[in-house]
Amino acid sequence: MVYSQKESPGSRRLLLSCLLLAAWGTGSGQLHYSVPEEAKHGTFVGRIAQDLGLELAELVPRLFRVASKERGDLLEVNVQNGILFVNSRIDREELCGRSAECGIHLEVIVDRPLQVFHVEVEVRDINDNLPRFSRQEQRLDILESRMPDSRFPIEGATDLDIGVNAALRYKVNPNEYFDLDVKTSEEETNILELVLKKILDREETQEHHLLLMAIDGGKPELTGTVQLLINVLDANDNAPEFVKSIYNVKLLENTPSETLVIKLNASDADEGINKEIVYFFSNLVLDDVQTKFKINSTSGEITVKGELDYEDRKLYEINIDAVDRSAFPLAGHCKVIVKLVDVNDNVPEMAITSLFLPIKEDAPLGTVIALISVSDRDSGENGQVTCSLTPHVPFRLVSTFKNYYSLVLDSALDRETTPGYEVVVTARDGGAPALWATASVSVEVADVNDNAPAFAQAEYTVFVKENNPPGAHIFTVSATDADAQENARVTYSLVERRVGARALSSYVSVHAQSGRVHALQPLDHEELELLRFQVSARDAGEPALGGQVTLQVFVLDDNDNAPALLGPEAGVQAAGVSQLLWRSVGAGHVVTKVRAVDADSGYNAWLSYELQPEAGGARSPFRVGLYTGEISTTRALDEADAPRQRLLVLVKDHGEPALTATATVLLSLVDSGQAPKAPSRSRALVDAAGREASLLDVNVYLIVAICAVSSLLVLTLLLYVALRCSAASPTEGACGPGKPVLVCSSAVGSWSYSQQRRHRVCSGEGPPKADLMAFSPSLPQGPSSTDNVKSFRLIWPGLHKETHFLFVNLVIYILYFSE
Ligand SMILES: *[C@@H]1O[C@H](CO)[C@@H](O)[C@H](O)[C@H]1NC(C)=O
Ligand SMILES: *[C@@H]1O[C@H](CO)[C@@H](O)[C@H](O)[C@H]1NC(C)=O
């Protein structure tokens, strides 16, 4: 910029004269001019020739010239008029910089005579330079935490001008945070500082933009500006914050490890490490929480670590600190409340607290057998336990109190039917799915002596052959007792009674333990055909119970009695007795009858009579009825027959082997003239014959009556046999001791069909014999029996038993009447 300055001629003149005087005064003739910088080309500086006292005309001839050491071309002299003027732009700042004095030194030289003049041209400053800042913008980093009145230096501007042109003032645009404070130092330089008026908040405004203006003192004033960029640095003045202060989380118990519970998210308004948050369990967190949960300090994820058990603990409170990473960290807090939700994970527990076992079979209903308590650690439905029992047991559960039960007897027990029960108690909770537990109780039923010893049959029929050895085992009774142990330990004893004149115990004995029945002495069929007695069985219970069985011991006949001869003079007859006989009697005359009995029965008592042949071999005129024993004549006697006849009659039973007796009958034959020696006998015989004739009519009726009774009996028997066969036991074919069975009894007598025969075959005990026995227990027995009675004992082998009976009866009567 070029400034031209016009000075008034008066003042110039005064100034020039002063300068001249001064120049002369120094002797060197120095001139001073002044010119403002930036003057235009041709700007007048001074009349240099005149001022030096030189004539204008002389200038050229004397070679007037101006030389400048530095920048000689800046000023020029017009040799025509001797005026110094500005030749080219003069910049004071370029020429002299910031020095206060600035001049251009000119040497003016003229020849002939050579003269040198020094001219000083002062360059005056004009305000041509702006205040200037070294940078376009200035950056300042200020921590937000700085206190008010904190000062921050900023760089000022420079002005190339000098003096007032370079005297700078400053100002910033108005703002609420900063003031500008300018101090001037001794060196006249400015010290600029920004003063904080109020606390900064990075979180509110991170950057402040200010405009700093420098204004110089020139006229007109020039300004320079610079941007102040104030960056607010973060201070850790914000604590991390959670959105909520309490987080509620529901979690199923038994949630596996590593399951995410919650992801926490705290935020921090700060920045940098001041907003980097790490999460921790607070110091308030108890140890047991730390064993169950863990937190990822960087992600804020809380995960399950241990086993969560609702039954152990239902609620966890976890205090969390969120801390930033700054050197002076701040923390935020929250609380996570973890509520566990019950899962049906606990099996009901069952305890049998008391057992009252064994239970007696006669225990009354409602007797308590066991006390049971149940529990379930779960809650709600999951912890509601119901108990049940195995079906079909005579027990039931009674709830005595919540979760307490007693097992009581519900129906009557019988140890003999069921000696024990395995009772299973099931406890089931109400969860879905339900869990259950079982406990089993072995209920042992204790025996009570409620069963008497029992025999398989009320009555047993035993057949024993007479003449048994003393002490022979004849039968074994056996009673069973359904009870146990002592209550079932049966002992046997004889029910004592009198048998005739003797005690029963003299016949038989029973072994107390084994029940073996022994005959103490040889039994005699002829003395005792049937021994009927009772054996009692008692158990060892308290009180003892007993039972009885009847034994019918039939003493079977053995052929142990020889036929015995009877008669008024039996002993004599046996020895041989003489009998008188008319020689005139015809053939078929019954002379006498040999009477014999056999104490045995059946075949053994069935006698037959035989005439022993005479030693002489002569043909005897007598014969004896095979079964009647009647001796009769076979022909008419004649003189040839010896007057004394001796007949030997052999009486033989049908036993095996047969026993015999021999009767000797002596007959004396008398002629008609001779007086009979024994008329009584003959008369008796005749009388008997007459009586027989009169009795015949009566006997016909008798036969009819007996036959009627017999046919009734036959009918009954037939009916019975039919029934018997249809209900035949399957074991009948087996070979064993053969259970004798009583068949029937009637008014006439008892009939007994026995399996004795088969029994004998099996035991190899003698030849098979009678199938049937007919007897009459009501009739007197023993050797004193009459013939009629004896005749009932006849048995005809090989015939069907009914017909046999009929037949035998008929035979008996035929024999009777034929006599
Ligand atoms: C955390 O919360 C902030 C604001 O509340 C949200 O912007 C950010 O996405 C959240 N982060 C996560 C991981 O939830
Ligand atoms: C924590 O979480 C971060 C990010 O989710 C993951 O990279 C880091 O492995 C986790 N740390 C642990 C110890 O699990």
Image (spheres, rainbow, N blue to C red):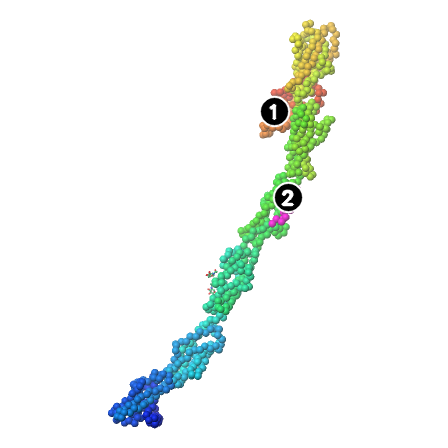
> Considering depth in this image, is 600 or 743 the residue closer to the camera?
600
Q: Quadrant of the N terminus?
A: bottom left
**Of the residues under marks 2 and 1, which one precedes in the sequence?**
2
Mark 1 residue crowding within 10 angstroms, few (<14) / some (14–19) / many (20+): few
- Looking at the picture, how far across and down is residue 420, in whole percent? 61, 42
**Quick check: is 665 in the magenta stretch?**
no
- Looking at the picture, how far across and down is residue 195, in whole percent? 46, 78
Horizontal side, residue 337 vs residue 358: left or right: left
Element on which disc 1 rests: loop
Mark 2 residue crowding within 10 angstroms, few (<14) / some (14–19) / many (20+): some
> Considering depth in this image, is 299 or 423 the residue closer to the camera?
299
Estimate the spatial distance between the alpha carbons at disc 2 and disc 1, rounded to whole Å. Answer: 53 Å
> Considering depth in this image, is 812 or 525 the residue closer to the camera?
525
User: Can residue 792 be seen in this snapshot?
Assistant: no
- Looking at the picture, how far across and down is residue 106, in whole percent? 31, 88
Horizontal side, residue 298 vs residue 443: left or right: left
Horizontal side, residue 504 vs residue 272: left or right: right
The image shows residue 581, relative to residue 514, as above or below, that is above
Q: Quadrant of the C terminus?
A: top right
The image shows residue 444, relative to residue 784, as above or below, that is below
Q: Residue at x 66, y 9 (%)?
A: 615
The image shows residue 146, relative to residue 165, as above or below, that is above
Residue kind at label 2, given as amino acid type? Pro
Q: Which residues are magenta?
A: 351-371
Q: Which residue is mark 1?
A: 764
Residue kind at label 1, given as amino acid type? Gly
Element on which disc 2 rests: loop
Residue 6 found in image quarter = bottom left
Residue 190 found in image quarter = bottom left
**Quick check: is 363 in the magenta stretch?**
yes
- Looking at the picture, how far across and down is residue 635, in whole percent? 66, 8
Q: Which residue is mark 2?
A: 358
